[in-house]
Image: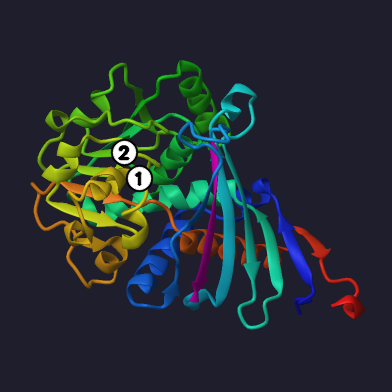
Amino acid sequence: MINMYVSLVLNDKEIFDLVNPREVVEACEKTWSEFALGRVINPPKLGLDLGETGNWPNLSAFMNAMPAYVDWLKVAGLKWAGGFWNNWRTGLPSISAVVLLIDPYNGMFKAIMEGATITSLRTAAQTALGIKYLAHKKASSVGIYGGGTQARYHIYVLSQIFPNMTFKIYDVREDTLKRTLELLERKFKVRANIEICKELKECTTDVDVTVTLTTAQEPFIKPEWVKKGHLIAALGSYQEVYDEVIKMANKIIVDHKEQTLHRGCLKRLVERGEITEKNIYATIGEVIAGLKPGRENMEEIILFIPIGTGMLDITVAELAYRKAIEKGIGVPVSLLRDKEIH
């Protein structure tokens, strides 16, 4: 019997050890489908701009509040997360996050969980599902821009879901790539075919799937690099592909229509009135639920834009929470100690 007055605190290592990539991907797949069917509540992110793009207060950072209710798991929660882009200079993680889970029937906080690990797992799961439903059937190679934490988790998750997949990776910082390769072997126990790219274009021209995981604030993927049948998964917070790449896509598929129009790859074109919601073909949830077809032929160029949603964070957090309860892992904390003051 779980004490409703107790919140379970779980750290990053406990979460990482509790869940495996395949069950994370399967749970995220279910939640995206349920969202398309109207059984998940997921408002757009509420952002706190701390100088993300060089504006006041000039901290090169942001935080987002990301609430969601996931009916199939009977859980609600909030991820409070952001990026602190100067942290690489001090060795601190660039992503800072916490996830709070509540019992939606009484509002009691079930769990307080480290959120960056959850973020990385569900972000990689997004791409895995994009490949499953949107890449062509013979896709065997992934090019990744950005060699940090998200790249590590992508290769960790994708190599387990697609064991024969090969990877190319590019980053402007050589030390970041070295650390990623070392951690993939030592910590993540990954044995994958990984090639370091010397030139930007190699992660697009020579692969079937391109994934962008950078903090670049200006486009760098050129239209002449993109070939027929390409899947481009644009996960960055800004626009990493040139306008022409967006416009040449046969289908634009997103995770959350309203949110995608105001952040990430489409934001500038939307502000200029060159793209509207009508240009978005479907959500990935609609494709998974069978409401709309995904890839329909080998030549389609598909642009997949999963900006990131709280529903997947809450899904992965609940998965870890249930396993923690079963195994007796985590630290119980009583937030309500004196009923007389409430």
The part of the chain drawn in magenta is 61-70
Name the spot of residue 182 as percent of width and height, x first. 53, 25
Please name the colour scheme applied to the rendered image: rainbow
The residue drawn where x is 52% and y is 53% is 20
The residue drawn where x is 91% and y is 80% is 340
Quarter of the image for the C terminus: give it: bottom right
Q: Is residue 45 magenta?
A: no
Residue occupying the far bottom of the picture: 105
Tell me: 218 left or right of 173.
Answer: left
The residue carrying mark 1 is: 264
**Which numbered marker is on residue 239?**
2
Mark 1 burial class by Cα count in 10 Å: few <14, some 14-19, many 20+: many
Quarter of the image for the N terminus: give it: bottom right
Name the spot of residue 319 as percent of width and height, x first. 56, 64
Name the spot of residue 292 as percent of width and height, x first. 19, 68
Name the spot of residue 306 as percent of width and height, x first. 35, 52
Q: CA distance from mark 1 to mark 2?
A: 6 Å
Mark 2 burial class by Cα count in 10 Å: few <14, some 14-19, many 20+: many
Which amino acid, mark 1?
Gly
Instruction: Classify mark 2: helix, strand or loop.
Output: loop
Q: Is 201 in front, or is 152? A: 201
Q: How many marks?
A: 2
Q: Main secondary structure of the magenta part?
A: strand
Do we see residue 326 in this rendering?
yes
Mark positioned earlier in the residue sequence (1 or 2):
2
Do we see residue 234 in this rendering?
no
Note whether 290 is above or below 58 in the view shown: below
Note whether 190 is above or below 128 in the view shown: above
Q: Is 294 in front, or is 22? A: 294
Instruction: Classify mark 1: helix, strand or loop.
Output: helix
In which image quadrant can residue 202 be found?
A: top left
The residue drawn where x is 25% and y is 65% is 287
